[in-house]
Image (cartoon, rainbow, N blue to C red):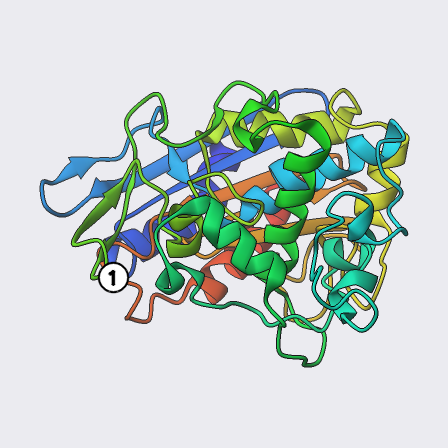
Amino acid sequence: MSGTLAEAAFAPAAEAVASGRIPGAMLGIVAADGRSSIMYDGMAALVPEPEILGEDHWFDLASVSKVIATTDMILKLAETGRLDLDRPLTDAIPDLRQYDPANAAERRLSFRDCLAHRTFLPAVEPIYTYGGDPERLRAFVLQREWRHGPAVYSDINYILLGIAIERLTGASLRDWPLGPGLAYGPPPGPAVATEACAWRGRVMKGEVHDENAWALGGAPGHAGLFGTVAGVLGFAAGLLDGSGASPFVLEAIRTPVQGHRTCGWEVRFDGWHGGDACSAATIGHTGFTGTGLWVDFERGLAWTLLTNRVHPTRHRETGILELRRATGDAVIAAWDAS
């Protein structure tokens, strides 16, 4: 793939780094025929010691974990008959809200409901503040009577899915086979720094940024995965050429379940993080730390923008939405012009 194409597409990220809005950024682009290109600039860490960003650095993928790991695991278990997407979670977790089996609404939630965030569960809860034992916190998640609200994007959905995978396979999510350049932490290589965490009292570097993921042992369903740019591109290439996803999986991740949400992913909608130039056959997902992955099936093209926008703190405006949208539009413009 042309270096000029990647350089043009990287221009918005380069400007964000140069202006100091984000410490570092890496853009990877891959085509269905396997051609790829990578551009990067900036710093992997500013504090406590400066470190220049390199192509071999591992990023905390945050909620991109949901699609690269958890969604993929659930759909492959469904394809092999280990679960039915439209059956309740209690098929895998019979003790979910076990003290109120007749009335607990959580016991009626299906796997597909959780994949598409079609539930009443809250977006997030400070689970890490309820204790320090990962197994006790899992029990807390399963037995809590969750407050009801409108359907929103919810980490709780995916924490439940992660527990379901553990129950069905008898193993941690860490034991699921992942491609090269993808791993639950600590990563086997240099890591990009995220936040100077007030709760843990240090800069997170090679440790998962998400507090709940950390407290739940580092490999729950909603976060915890680390990846290199090559690892994320390898996963995307498997979606584009079919080597990493069957027709069953591809249909599930591309077909809306409710609104713009599919099983795990989002399809393009007005104002989304992937920009306006991609085709309607594009899916994507973002991560809180500043990561994202988008796959345009019509063009046979995917791109990932990996940043450490929460370093050294989340409590500042970095313009990440605008950067993601500008990058997506720049990728498509460069591709269409090539």
Name the side, left or right, on which 267 lies relative to 124.
right
Q: Nearer the viewer, residue 143 or 65?
A: 143
Q: Is residue 273 visible?
A: no
Position in image of residue 50 (x %, y %): 12, 40
Residue at image location 64% in from the left, 52% down from the top: 160
Please name the residue that numbered disc 1 is placed on: 313
Q: Residue furthest bottom?
A: 149
* Frontmost residue, 291 versus 31: 291
In this view, which residue lies farthest toward the left? 49
Q: Residue at x 42, y 53 (%)?
A: 290
Task: Please tell me which residue is depicted at 53% across the width and 44% down the height of the picture.
Answer: 220
Q: Nearer the viewer, residue 189 or 7?
A: 189
Viewed as shown, does residue 233 lie left or right of 168? left
- The percent position of residue 148, horizontal first and vertical second, equals 67, 79
Q: Report helix, strand or loop for mark 1.
A: loop
**Placement of the N terminus among the 4 image quadrants:** top right
Query: Residue 314, position in %: x, y?
Result: 31, 64
Residue 86, placed above or below residue 229: below
Q: Amino acid at mark 1?
A: Thr
Give me the residue at 12% from left, 47% from top. 47
